[in-house]
């Protein structure tokens, strides 16, 4: 099959060596015509010259910025192209696909060599694949102005000026008359001057090639033609293609639909609470031709079945209703606005997954140049064999016998485009006829449906309440799941702590030479990081502080009365400390009969917050404290006696 693009010259271009931002880049150039394929390696300058000389219909590339260093350079390049030449990026618009993927999708041979990539780009463009790159609108400015200065020309200055302005006015009227005869829409803006016009500007809604006026300069008058530039770069498809697609539909109070290509690319998703079935069908028709209509539940709901029948497409449902977590997982890489769109999208994606192998087998049998989507559609929805479809298409491509002895005239690109659009219009009109028939059937049921309206609204309210309740329960379930996960983490932490506490009784005491094989004579030590109320409470919450415990203060400094009293309330057996106690804390612990000893006097082995020490070292530290306590009591008693004697003597002296 031959496309209309091959009726003219198509250039395929790919960088062979270097970069357009550097110096002297070279390009692989493939010139594709109906009769031949030419291949060459050219410089950037020669490429521009060939484009100007041969005026190809299309210059095709996989990346437009291989021909221009930046946006301004690209606009300049587009402005330098011949009027009938279009720059086409075959890989898409602002977010192009890999050339290999586009070529594979359309059955075009592809290789990584620059010349092979250039040829693939040319053949894709010849099949109307790609986006036309445009920096100019379809509006053209035609300016008629003075062709020379109004200075003295040998006559008196007034007569010379009047003649020039009169010539501008005459030419402007001729241009206006030509535009009227061509039935072109335009706006005119005139600046009048002495004897006629200084200039006249026509803004015409057409391309330069459609305007029967040429730019020139003749004597007193100059005519300039310039296309209006866009604010940015615009992409327009070479041909509006209605690709074959898979449609997922989620019916209900809110109807949602998703469009997915046969290779699994998500094309669009949509949902509405107010649209009817006709709106849904119109939305789908504008985006593709359904091969499969899918639902996320089984059996297929009646509403979805009606959509399937309206498109004469194949149906797909899962073996069992799709679970929410399955749908969430399958759609995790694709954006959607609500749960209805998610369900429709999941149905379409699972349907593509289910048919992926079949699609691949069909595609392998389809030769280049034949629409794979059309073959897949007839095999899947029409239940035809691949061979029968290909035979049918091949027969359609064979020329019919002619009664006359001459060949029919080849259609021009414009005629091919018109034929394609007419076929598209016929398809849409046929679909409109079917829709109008259904609308007539609905009109006959209006009276019956009106009687059910109240009940339907009641059901809708119930459905809304149900959806709200489901949403609330889902949020509650998510919250409970988070709480469960937090509880599991806490349990894991506590279990780990229990294991550490158990490890206290399984420590390797190889450095304690006098410990027996049964590790007898050890006592647990509970560690408090600082002598503060918060640190004491944390230790109590973590592993409990009880009477007769051995407590180890890593940092004993800074405590006051209340902190010391809090520790004394636990009635520890002994307090081992690093650092010095404050006088107040020492006094409180002493008065509470809590032994205090330096930690260096007791050999300890630590595991996280807990430790073990030798029983005899602890007993020795306690005995030592009692000795010091008795000495301190004696010292305090002696000091008190001395103070009483001193006070008594002081009283006698006063007497």
Image (cartoon, rainbow, N blue to C red):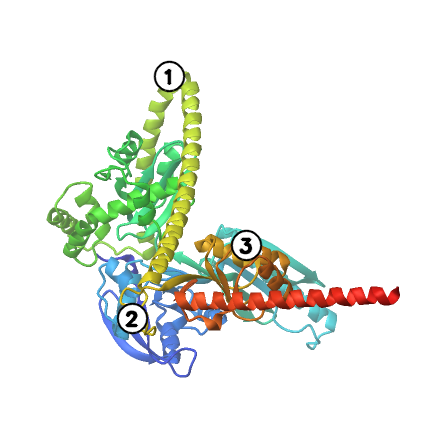
Residue 57's x, y, as percent?
35, 64
Kindly identify which residue carries mark 2: 118
Question: How far is the residue under mark 2 from the one under mark 3?
Answer: 46 Å
- Quarter location, residue 312: top left
Which of the numbered marks, if any, corresponds to residue 448? 1
Give the secondary structure at mark 2. Answer: helix
Residue positioned 81% across, 67% down in the render: 649
- Depth order, front residue of 152/641: 641
Question: How far is the residue under mark 2 from the one under mark 1?
Answer: 64 Å
- Quarter location, residue 19: bottom left
Quick one: label 3, few (<14), some, or many (20+) residues within 10 Å? few
Give the secondary structure at mark 1. Answer: helix
Q: Residue furthest bottom?
A: 23
Quick one: label 2, few (<14), some, or many (20+) residues within 10 Å? many
Q: Is residue 189 above or below residue 301?
A: below
Kindly identify which residue carries mark 3: 177
Residue 263 seen by the camera: yes
């Amino acid at each position: 099959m031959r496309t209309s693009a091959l009726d003219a010259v198509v250039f395929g271009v790919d960088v062979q060596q270097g970069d357009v931002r550097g110096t002297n880049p070279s390009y692989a150039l493939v010139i594709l015509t109906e009769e031949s394929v030419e291949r060459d390696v050219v410089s950037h300058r020669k490429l521009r010259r060939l484009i100007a000389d041969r005026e190809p219909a299309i210059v095709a590339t996989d990346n437009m910025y291989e021909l221009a260093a930046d946006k301004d350079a690209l606009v300049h390049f587009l402005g330098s192209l011949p009027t009938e030449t279009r720059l086409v990026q075959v890989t898409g618009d602002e977010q192009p696909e890999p050339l290999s993927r586009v070529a594979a999708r359309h059955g075009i041979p592809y290789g990584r060599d620059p010349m092979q990539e250039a040829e693939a780009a040319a053949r894709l463009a010849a099949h109307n694949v790609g986006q036309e790159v445009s920096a100019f609108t379809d509006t053209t400015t035609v300016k008629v102005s003075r062709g020379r200065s109004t200075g003295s020309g040998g006559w008196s200055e007034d007569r010379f000026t009047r003649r020039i302005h009169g010539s501008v006015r005459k030419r402007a009227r001729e241009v206006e008359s030509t535009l009227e005869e061509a039935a072109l829409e335009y706006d005119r803006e005139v600046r009048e001057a002495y004897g006629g016009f200084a200039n006249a500007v026509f803004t015409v809604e057409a391309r330069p090639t459609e305007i029967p006026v040429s730019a020139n300069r003749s004597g007193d008058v100059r005519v300039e033609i310039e296309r209006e530039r866009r604010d940015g770069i615009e992409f327009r498809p070479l041909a509006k293609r209605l690709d074959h697609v898979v449609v997922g539909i989620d019916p209900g109070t809110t109807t949602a639909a998703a469009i997915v290509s046969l290779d699994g690319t998500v094309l669009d998703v949509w949902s509405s609470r107010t649209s009817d079935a006709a709106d849904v069908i119109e939305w789908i028709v504008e985006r593709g031709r359904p091969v499969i209509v899918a639902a996320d539940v089984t059996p297929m709901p009646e509403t979805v079945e009606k959509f399937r029948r309206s498109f004469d497409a194949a149906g797909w449902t899962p073996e069992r209703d799709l679970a929410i977590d399955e749908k969430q997982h399958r759609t995790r890489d694709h954006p959607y606005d609500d749960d209805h769109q998610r369900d429709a999208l999941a149905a379409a994606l699972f349907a593509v997954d289910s048919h992926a192998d079949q699609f691949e087998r069909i595609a392998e049998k389809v030769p280049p140049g034949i629409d794979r989507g059309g073959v897949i559609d007839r095999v899947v929805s029409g239940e035809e064999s691949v061979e029968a479809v290909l035979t049918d298409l091949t027969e359609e491509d064979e020329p019919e016998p002619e009664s006359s002895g001459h060949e029919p005239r080849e259609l021009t690109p414009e005629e091919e485009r018109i034929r394609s659009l007419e076929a598209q219009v016929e398809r849409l009109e046929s679909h409109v006829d079917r829709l109008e028939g259904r609308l007539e059937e609905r009109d006959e049921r209006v009276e019956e449906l009106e009687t059910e309206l109240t009940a339907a609204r009641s059901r809708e309210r119930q459905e809304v309440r149900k959806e709200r309740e489901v949403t609330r329960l889902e949020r509650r379930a998510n919250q409970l799941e988070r709480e469960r996960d937090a509880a599991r983490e806490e349990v894991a932490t506590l279990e780990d702590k229990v294991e550490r506490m158990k490890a206290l009784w399984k420590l390797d005491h190889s450095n304690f030479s006098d410990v027996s094989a049964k590790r007898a004579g050890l006592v647990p030590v509970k560690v408090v990081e600082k002598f503060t109320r918060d640190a004491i409470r944390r230790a109590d919450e973590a592993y409990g502080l009880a009477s007769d415990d051995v407590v180890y203060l890593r940092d004993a400094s800074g405590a006051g009365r209340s902190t010391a009293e809090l520790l004394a309330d636990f009635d520890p057996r002994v307090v081992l400390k690093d650092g010095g106690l404050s006088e107040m804390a020492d006094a409180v612990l002493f008065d509470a009969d809590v032994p205090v000893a330096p930690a260096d006097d007791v050999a300890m082995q630590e595991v996280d917050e807990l430790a073990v020490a030798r029983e005899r070292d602890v007993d020795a530290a306690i005995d030592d404290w009692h000795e010091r306590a008795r000495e301190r009591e004696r010292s305090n008693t002696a000091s008190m006696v001395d103070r009483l004697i001193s006070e008594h003597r002081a009283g006698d002296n006063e007497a």
